[in-house]
């Protein structure tokens, strides 16, 4: 188990079957692998053994979280309709302006390389060379993986208006299976990409796609949605947004 400001991460099972579950307060945005709890669970020390029982999660001998009552929340992106794509195209101008105003995400040369790769991507109907992206860059979720998740979000959002995105997503699922994703990047990042390929994304990315389809004019809602994406991780949010915008720039005008 490891800790972060709004909660703790629990790893179940050793690699390669390992999975991480985050127990976090409502101050942290939800992810496909997170559970929101009413209280901070910092009582448990790092390295505390954890296990599940039929009605609860045990964190050592002294702390237990009851499973009931609980609510499951969907973190799926709702694909845009064709009639909404003009709004998306108009609103994406604000996203590009926001990205242009951001400082460089990182001075790490690998992150700079990923930034260059994103700017030159042409992955509307074909996948980028995943072996060059996955695991590239720094952080608990490397920047190349963050950019790929942004691309996955864009392809998913465009499924209704651009049916070819379906084949791209199927190709991505097949590719990450073939290249043994869990051996190429961090546990957290592999889990993130696997969830995205299955249609589940961090809550701020879902909110951003909902904001983009609205009629232009509500700049406050769109700006706040972008803020929430950019607040994810040290630089993850910026690479999420870069990958997302790179695909949308081509799809919305294609």
Image: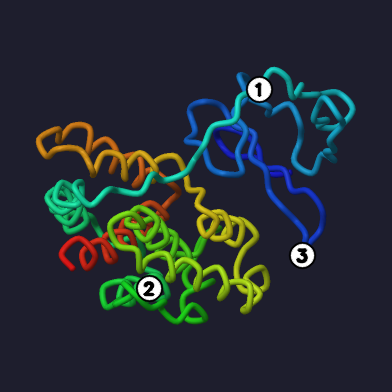
The mark nearer the N terminus, 2 or 1, is 1
Please name the residue that numbered disc 1 is placed on: 70
Residue nearest the viewer, comparing 251 with 247: 251
Mark 2 or mark 1, whichever is nearer to me: 1
Please name the residue that numbered disc 2 is placed on: 114
Residue extending farthest to the right is 61
- Tell me which residue sits at (48%, 28%) in the image: 27
Name above or below for residue 155 compared with residue 32.
below
Between marks 2 and 3, how big is the CA–CA gap?
Answer: 26 Å
Quadrant for the C terminus, please: bottom left
Mark 1 or mark 3, whichever is nearer to me: 1
Picture coordinates of residue 153, whole percent (x, y): 39, 55
* C-beta proximity under 8 Å, tags 2 and 3: no
Tell me the crowding category of disc 3: few under 14, some 14 to 19, or many 20 or more residues within 10 angstroms, Cα based. Answer: few
Image mark count = 3
Residue nearest the viewer, comparing 22 with 161: 161
Q: Which mark is residue 16?
A: 3
Picture coordinates of residue 34, whole percent (x, y): 60, 38
- Quarter assignment of residue 203: top left
Between marks 1 and 3, how big is the CA–CA gap?
Answer: 29 Å
Mark 2 or mark 3, whichever is nearer to me: 3
- Quarter assignment of residue 56: top right
**In the drawing, does residue 18 fall left or right of residue 110?**
right
Name above or below for residue 136 compared with residue 78.
below
The mark nearer the N terminus, 1 or 3, is 3
Q: Which mark is residue 204?
A: none
Picture coordinates of residue 86, whole percent (x, y): 14, 51
Circle 2 — which element? helix
- Tell me which residue sits at (85%, 40%) in the image: 49
The mark nearer the N terminus, 2 or 3, is 3
**In the drawing, does residue 168 fall left or right of residue 212?**
right
Tell me the crowding category of disc 2: few under 14, some 14 to 19, or many 20 or more residues within 10 angstroms, Cα based. Answer: many
């Amino acid at each position: 188990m490891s800790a972060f400001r709004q909660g703790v991460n629990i790893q179940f099972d050793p690699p390669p079957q390992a999975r991480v579950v985050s127990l976090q307060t409502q101050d942290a945005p939800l992810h496909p692998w997170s559970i929101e709890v009413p209280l901070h669970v910092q009582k448990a020390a790092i390295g505390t053994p954890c296990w599940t029982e039929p009605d609860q999660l045990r964190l050592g001998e002294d702390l237990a979280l009851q499973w009931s009552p609980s609510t499951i929340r969907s973190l799926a992106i709702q694909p845009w309709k064709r009639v909404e794509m003009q709004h998306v195209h108009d609103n994406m101008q604000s996203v590009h302006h926001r990205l242009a105003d951001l400082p460089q995400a990182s001075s790490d040369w690998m992150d700079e390389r990923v930034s260059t790769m994103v700017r030159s991507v042409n992955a509307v109907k074909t996948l980028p060379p995943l072996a060059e992206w996955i695991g590239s860059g720094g952080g608990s979720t490397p920047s190349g993986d963050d950019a790929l998740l942004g691309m996955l979000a864009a392809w998913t959002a465009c499924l209704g208006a651009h049916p070819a995105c379906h084949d791209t997503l199927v190709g991505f699922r097949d590719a990450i299976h073939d290249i043994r994703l869990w051996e190429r990047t961090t546990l957290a990042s592999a889990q993130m990409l696997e969830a995205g390929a299955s249609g589940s994304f961090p809550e701020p990315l879902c909110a951003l796609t909902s904001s983009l389809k609205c009629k232009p004019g509500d700049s406050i809602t769109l700006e706040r949605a972008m803020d929430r994406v950019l607040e994810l991780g040290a630089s993850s949010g910026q690479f999420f947004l870069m990958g997302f915008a790179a695909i949308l720039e081509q799809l919305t005008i294609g």
